[in-house]
Amino acid sequence: MKTPKPSYASFRPVILLSLTIALAIAGTDTSAQTDSIALIARWKKGEGRNYLIKKAEVRYTNGALTTNDSSSYTVSVTVTDSSRTNYNLDWRSESPLLSNKTYPELAGLDEKYQNLSVKYSTDQNGAFQKLLNRDEIIQMMNEALDLYVAQKKDTGSLSSDNVEAVKQIFSSPGTIEGLALKEISLFHFPYGVWYHYGSTFEYQEQIGVPLLGAPVASTGRLTLESIDTLHHTCRIKNSVQLDSVSSKKAIATMLEVMVAKSTFKSEQEKQTKLQEMRKAFSTMELTIDRESVFEINYSTGWPIPVVFTQNTFASTPEEGGLRRLETVSVTAVDK
């Protein structure tokens, strides 16, 4: 098993091994294996699956619950093309990517983009490669930001300077894929790897975190927890801990870019704001832990359920403590 190379603007923080796997398993019946699995896609053009996406976010500030949000929707995932080297897929939501039920300020855009789906490609094993209609998705998001700011201009909650900074960040490699389309990154994370039952593979990697201008060092542990040869399913867990120092530096870099692009009454006011930020980050405690659990039918290569959780804790002497728990699940359903 090869050591994963750092991927600074990667869509998914994952170990992509070179796929000599395809040759290695060419004459192997993986259903007969009881101690190892080569996880590769076995999809065919025209086939697909339906999935229920559930998202939840809980936040505590100084121990008090401040946010408890959840949402759900269904998507259809269809293989639109396949070859010896890659697959093309279409990820289509039951509702527009922009819904005025969630954001009333965006009324009108949901109709304009109601038929927009996410088109992307994977390698021959099912690992994500790239978006095929990235420019169209960025255009939609830029229009949404402009409309949102126009609706909120009287509240002063967003400035045009900040919006332009956000647009620039969204256009950077990996941000759209890893932030707005996180479910797709979860869906394709574990493909193209040999898994051995009872063994944990520990790896070091630089993760390209969405919205942050610098990569974040992390330690990951990938484990094949179980194999069910009767039903041709396996359960894989990936645990990742982001380095606290590296995370703080990346967040500080991103915020300094935001401040640098904002408008201030004077240069002194701008420098004062920057100093306040630097002081806060120098005393901050920060931990970010991620865990993903995948149950996959290894004979077909289609995920059954996938569950992702991220636990973030940050505290400063001035602001107190903030804890955020994010959960995303992707579960196969019949329509």
Image: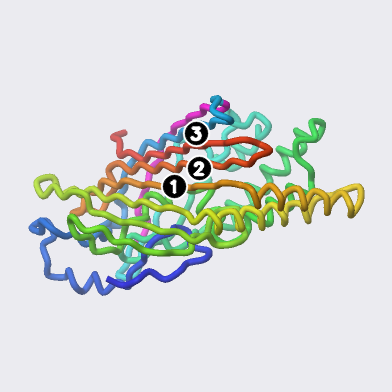
Where is residue 159? Give x, y as percent. Answer: 79, 43
Q: Which SS class for mark 1?
A: strand
Main SS of the magenta part reads strand
Query: Observer-nearest residue: 163 or 218?
Result: 218
Say above or below: 296 vs 56: below
Q: Are marks 1 and 2 in contact (CB under 8 Å)?
A: yes
Give the quarter of the figure containing the N terminus. bottom left
The one nearer the camera, 51 or 268, is: 268
Q: Nearer the viewer, mark 2 or mark 3?
A: 2
Q: Quadrant of residue 245?
A: bottom right
Q: Disc 3 designates what residue?
A: 57
- Residue tagged 1: 289
- The reply, left or right, for residue 254 in relation to residue 58 is right
Instruction: Give the extent of the magenta segment.
Output: 66-81
Q: Residues within 10 Å of mark 3 (few under 14, many from 20)?
A: some
Mark 2 nearby-residue class (10 Å; few <14, some 14–19, many ≥20): some
The disc at residue 249 is none
Within the image, what quadrant is residue 261 found in?
A: bottom right
**Location of mark 2 (residue):** 312
Q: What residue lies at 48% left-to-right and 64% top-to-bottom?
A: 206
For marks 1 and 3, the one nearer the N-term is: 3
| Mark 1 / mark 2, whichever is N-terminal | 1
The x and y percentages for residue 230 are: 9, 46
| Left or right of residue 34: residue 5 | right
**Residue shown at the point (39%, 43%) measured from the top left:** 308
Q: Amino acid at mark 3?
A: Glu
Real-space Cα separation, disc 1 to disc 2, in angstroms: 7 Å
